[in-house]
């Protein structure tokens, strides 16, 4: 369950000082969000997304594909942990520490029963303000992906073929979403 905290004076530094109690803590614009360990199907979706994205990201040197837990700090009052994300390369090399990652090429959150508000509103607005070119919200129940871009007022909802075009001259990555959702939800 995502538990927004009433106090809005949370900082990335305060969140990092919290004890390791199995929860995932994030802070967005001073609002602390706490999430318990994800469900198995959530982690299966994270794994399948990484399997689809990683060969493309590596082959085209788009960045470095990672997944949570992470410490992505946009500013002192914002520390996020996207489920799956692509961090940009730094002068052609991979980032070596979290503090070198100050922006993202792609951020992905897989919805959990309790994370709708945090993922669809709080984090979405913050990712848009940070200029993250694409933010995907993976809705396992709807078997669809909500794609957000900076400045967009509405999500593009994709349920069939999801194309990701991180750079203009690259051939886009095409992901068959029904096949992806079958691998996550219908696997034996």
Image (tube, helix red, strand yellow):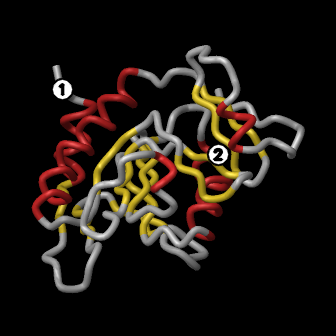
Residue 182 sits in quarter: top left
Judged from the image, the secondary structure of the residue bearing numbered disc 2 is: helix
Residue 68 sits in quarter: top left
Q: Which residue is mark 2?
A: 118
Q: Quadrant of the C terminus?
A: top left
Q: Name the disc covering residue 108, or none.
A: none
Q: Which residue is mark 1?
A: 187
Could you tell whether 125 is left or right of 53 in the image? right
Callout 2: 10 Å neighbours few (<14), some, many (20+)?
many
Instruction: Count numbered badges in the picture.
Output: 2
Residue at 53% x, 42% y is 71
Residue at 25% x, 44% y is 50
> Up-down: is 154 above or below 50?
below
Name the spot of residue 113 as percent of width and height, x first: 56, 32
Judged from the image, the secondary structure of the residue bearing numbered disc 1 is: loop
Q: Quadrant of the N terminus?
A: top right
Residue 22 sits in quarter: top right
Name the spot of residue 91 as percent of width and height, x first: 30, 70
Work out whether residue 156 or residue 100 is closer to the camera in this orientation and state it.
100
Work out whether residue 100 or residue 70 is closer to the camera in this orientation and state it.
100
> Up-down: is 116 above or below 90?
above
């Amino acid at each position: 369950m995502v538990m927004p905290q009433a106090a809005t004076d949370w900082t990335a530094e305060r969140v990092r000082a919290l004890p390791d109690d199995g929860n995932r803590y994030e802070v967005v614009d001073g609002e602390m969000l706490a999430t318990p360990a994800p469900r198995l199907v959530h982690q299966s979706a994270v794994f399948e997304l990484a399997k689809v994205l990683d060969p493309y990201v590596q082959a085209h040197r788009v960045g470095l594909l990672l997944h949570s837990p992470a410490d992505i700090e946009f500013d002192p009052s914002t520390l996020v942990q996207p489920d799956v994300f692509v961090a940009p390369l730094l002068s052609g090399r991979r980032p070596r520490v979290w503090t070198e990652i100050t922006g993202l090429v792609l951020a992905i959150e897989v919805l959990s029963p309790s994370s709708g508000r945090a993922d669809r509103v709080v984090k979405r607005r913050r990712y848009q303000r940070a200029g993250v070119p694409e933010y995907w919200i993976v809705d396992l129940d709807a078997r669809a992906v909500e794609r957000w871009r900076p400045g967009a007022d509405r999500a593009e909802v994709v349920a069939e073929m999801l194309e990701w075009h991180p750079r203009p001259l690259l051939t886009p990555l095409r992901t068959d979403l029904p096949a992806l959702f079958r691998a996550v939800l219908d696997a034996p």
